[in-house]
Amino acid sequence: MSEAEPSPRHLLTRVVAAGRPAREPDAPLNAPIVPVSALHAGGPYEYAREGAPTTAAFEEALGEVEGGIAIAFASGMAAANAVFDTWPGGVTVVAPSAAYTGVAVRLRELDERGAINLRIVDAHDTKGVLAALDGAHTLWMESPTNPMLDVAELEVVIPEARRRGVHTVVDNTFATPIIQRPLEWGADIVLHSVTKSISGHSDLLMGALVTQDAEMAEKLRVRRVLLGAAPSAFDCYLALRGLRTLGLRVERAQANASAITQAISAHPAITKVRYPGFGTMAAIEIVGGAEAAERVCESVQVWTHATSLGGVESLLERRRRWPLESPRVPESLIRLSFGIEYESDLLADLQQALDRSQS
Ligand SMILES: *Cc1c(COP(=O)(O)O)cnc(C)c1O
């Protein structure tokens, strides 16, 4: 009986295989859309805020890919608010200065009303992050940060936070589990705006939390129930369909990001390129401030001028056009979300838009 342990299958295989119906004659290959609010009594779901078959299929697949138990939410912000809602009153929370705008605004609101005591750090300043951990309840991290593309040393700060009894939550929306898996470094919770790369087609709003702690998973699921933040069956179906190609999409978009940021770095209209060397996101700063940056956004034809990120189509926008964006973000900064189009078409389009911005 000395059967060898089967070697664990590669992530790119598991993302395709996870969350499917049992292999039985005539069973569908894909989990069907089950539009439902109430289910017959006696089973695991009962009512769709608690859970539902299509939601469960998506959760099973994302949990497999990120390495934990996944709970799906109606949006990334709904997932973030579910985490905030588990905190006891008055706890200290350490968070990055340029966190996702919605998260940053909510944390400031909670701080102002005395619900938490917020300590702001620079995510990439490891010493500063570690110094802020004393007496903290939670370390909230995002890496790379949106839209500054700062990279935190997660492999250092997560284990150190854990050693000091500080919970860590990592917003992994930018990196995706294909590139970075914070639960493996000991993070307590990973957050995704499923709206972005996980679903990948800019056609739905969803969020998710993933944890390896079954008790925490139940706590977060109960937050979904009580906050009423459950996703729809149709969105779960689309998100699962998108998740199947996450590996391909990220590899392709990352290759575009890497090549194109390199190729435009010497363009005379650009003062700075922010690309951490991995991932599908970058930012550029433009000669001529906000006005010239807006001209770039208006001049693109292959790229699309729109907010959001992580879809198959390449998107760009000047972040400071949003009134709530951090004043630390330069006025001329354009965030680039690389899609899966052909590299030289994206490059040529960006180059002509940069040329026009200076005329
Ligand atoms: C978009 C985004 C969110 C919020 O997600 P929604 O699905 O828009 O609610 C949170 N974090 C990051 C990094 C994001 O990009």
Image (spheres, rainbow, N blue to C red):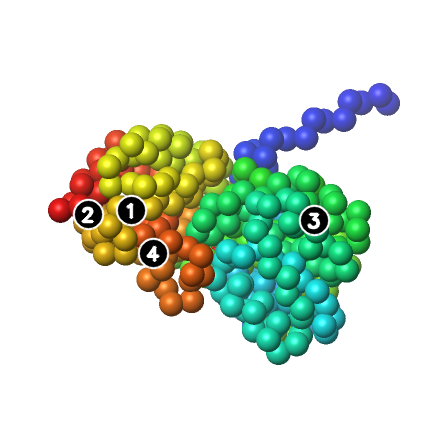
State the separation of the CA atoms marked 4 and 2. 15 Å
N-term-proximal mark, 2 vs 1: 1
Q: Which residue is mark 3?
A: 130
State the separation of the CA atoms marked 1 and 3. 34 Å
Name the amino acid type tagged 1. Answer: Ile
Query: Could you tell me if the residues under marks 2 and 1 are in contact, i.e. CB atoms within 8 Å?
Result: yes
Disc number for residue 286: 1
Name the amino acid type tagged 4. Answer: Glu
Disc number for residue 155: none
Q: Residues within 10 Å of mark 1 (few under 14, many from 20)?
A: many
Q: Residues within 10 Å of mark 4 (few under 14, many from 20)?
A: some
Name the residue furthest bottom. 113
* Residue 206 spot, x, y in % from top left: 50, 60
Task: Report whether residue 129 is seen.
Answer: yes
- Nearest to the observer: residue 220 or residue 32: 220
Label 3: element kind: helix
Name the amino acid type tagged 2. Answer: Ser
N-term-proximal mark, 4 vs 1: 1
* Residue 337 spot, x, y in % from top left: 38, 46
N-term-proximal mark, 1 vs 3: 3
Looking at the image, residue 312 sits to the left or right of residue 348; the answer is: right
Q: Which residue is mark 4?
A: 331
Q: Which residue is mark 2?
A: 357
Label 4: element kind: loop
